Amino acid sequence: MASVAEVLAAPPKHKELVKNVQLEGQVLLKIMQHCNEALPQVVTGQLLGLDVGQQLEVTDCFPFPAVVPEEEGDGEDNYQLQMMHRLRDVNVDNNTVGWYQSANFGSFQTVELIDTFMNYHENIKKCVCIIYDPQRSARGTIALKAIRLKESFVDLHKEGKMTLKGFREANLSWRDIFVELPIKLRNSNLVQALVASLAPAPTATQADVERLNLSTAPFLERNIQSLVECVDDIVQEQQKVTMYHKNVARQQQLFSAWLAKRRQENAQRAQDGQEPLPEEDPAQFRPIAEPSMLDNYLVTNQISTYCDQINLAASEAIQKLFLMEGMQKAGL
Amino acid sequence: MAASVSIRVHPVVLFSICDAFTRRKEHQDRVIGTLLGVVDGNVIEVKNCYVVPHNESSEQVMVDVVHHKTMFDLHQRVAPHEVIVGWFATGPELYNSDALIQEFYSKESAHPVHIVVDTTLRDDKFAIQAYTSRVLSLGDKTLATEFVEIPCETIFGDIERVGAELMLTGFNDPSPEAKKDTVNKSFNDEAETLAASMQRLADLVARASDYVDSVNSGKVQGDPAIGRYLADTLALVPHLAKPDFERLFNESVQDSMMVTYLSDLLRAHVALAERLGTAALPIM
């Protein structure tokens, strides 16, 4: 599979970036079915398709098993490989273009996600992750997102410069980790015929019912709860940074004290006509590793997602309330 | 039991079958495959499927058993509760070789069902038919396999319905530009769709009241069932006294405002932190 991907990501096309994602109807339904059935478990699966210039066409997908059997260490790879072979036999585009995963209330920005992205990046330059949020979708809107990592972030990650300094030198802010891509839905003509014959457009759709539901409180509550957790996280991250600065300051103090002592000693030795001792840094003053800023940035990203969701839900709630008021007034 | 069985198909299965059909090999008339699902009493719910390569001539049929077995094992690892319930084929009608394939699937499942999806769109219809088989025998000798048609319906889960409707509303407008727009909008903008939903609700209420009016004026013979539904629906509408409603309304609006304020505050924090170039939230 890697070879196919390499051929496709051949040098001339190499620089081109994915600009939008085209989903096929069956992929959408498969993702929805898999993610909803597994609730509240978070599940993942693989996306198969083609990349055509700036567009990534996702034409099929298959789910990953939730638990990898213990006896074979490479169980998942094996499963993946077998599945791809079988699918190739029936002419499915067997070219990995990314993966999908479910996210509860939009919480997907994790270190694991970044790691997975980096893993995929080794073989496939153009890969996307589709995030599907079953809980939000239950409220009448399909919460689907396609994201990829920003190239400059990938480069930075490869160099391992996940520190504040690294980020600042690369001029990256927390906004620059993920890039969201627009999603288009497309179906073959045959499938369009199927959709049309399956359900003639109903007058009131299920989505309407969910959308007009007045109770947004549980959703908001969950969001705020997660938001509070995020703020706690970021405070913790902040403490790490403070600790680091404290440690560095203390180390420097110790070092200068030691240096002063060593110089005194050396002056003494020079008087006695002895060789001076080196003024080099001994092993105990090794520089302290700077904490990674990745977590911090991810949590910030998360916070911004929650804020967006809350704002959206709250403004929606207010709209609905005023609608209610209007109806009530008209009725009275 | 064979006669009373009914089948419920999830739309995702039909989508996959269509996709498989468009991906069939050259010179191949139809595709066949295995159906996976759950059996609950007399209702068989078909939730998943996969294609099995096959080769057929007028005389014989070859099914890739290894492929079938591996795919089943792989699916079992994801969804252990799904079992083989039957098989599907595309095409306008039953073929001669179907009996042979049916025989093969009887080994995999106690009562395999056979679903035929007419991808040729004969009579401009997307016909989906389900069959179960009955063995005709004389004494100990098996003479033939008879396919008996059984009821088959497509069901949507709540969220699947939303997805299908999304595709449907996207396709109502024939121009490709408009299609693209609708799709993108429904993915992102929750607020704008609210207006459309409200409009549809108003239309429905208007239709109901038109109906009631015409019954009252004697133009249409009233249907007691509809009347009962309307009465039940009206009974569900809560009657609130004005002060109560205002209190409720104000409280809810204030709650929402408060929440918005909080989230905006936090956003301001984050933005400030970014400007200051520190990782810390400045006022915390």
Image (cartoon, coloured by chain):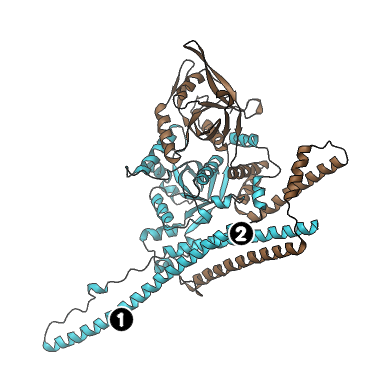
Task: From this view, report whether residue B64 is shown above or below residue A272.
Answer: above
Q: Secondary structure at mark 1?
A: helix
Residue type at numbered disc 2: Ala
**Residue ranking furthest to the right:** B217
- Identify the residue at the far left of this view: A273
- Residue A196, given in percent of the width and then of the height, sits at 65, 36
Where residue A75 appears, as percent x and y from the top left, is 35, 42
Q: Quadrant of residue A326?
A: bottom right
Residue at 58% x, 57% y: name it: A219
Q: Which residue matches tag 1?
A: A253
Q: Colour of chain A?
A: cyan
Residue A244 visible: yes
Residue A31 x/y as whole percent: 51, 44
* Residue under numbered circle 2: A217
- State left or right for residue B127 relative to residue A76: right
Neighbour tally class for label 1: few under 14, some 14-19, many 20 plus, Cα within 10 Å = few
Chain B rendering hue: brown
Q: Identify the residue shown where x is 47% and y is 63%.
A: A299
* Camera-nearest label, 1 or 2: 2
* Residue type pointed to by label 1: Gln
Disc 2 is placed on an element classified as: helix
Residue B105, compared with residue A291, is above or below; it is: above
Q: Chain of mark 2?
A: A
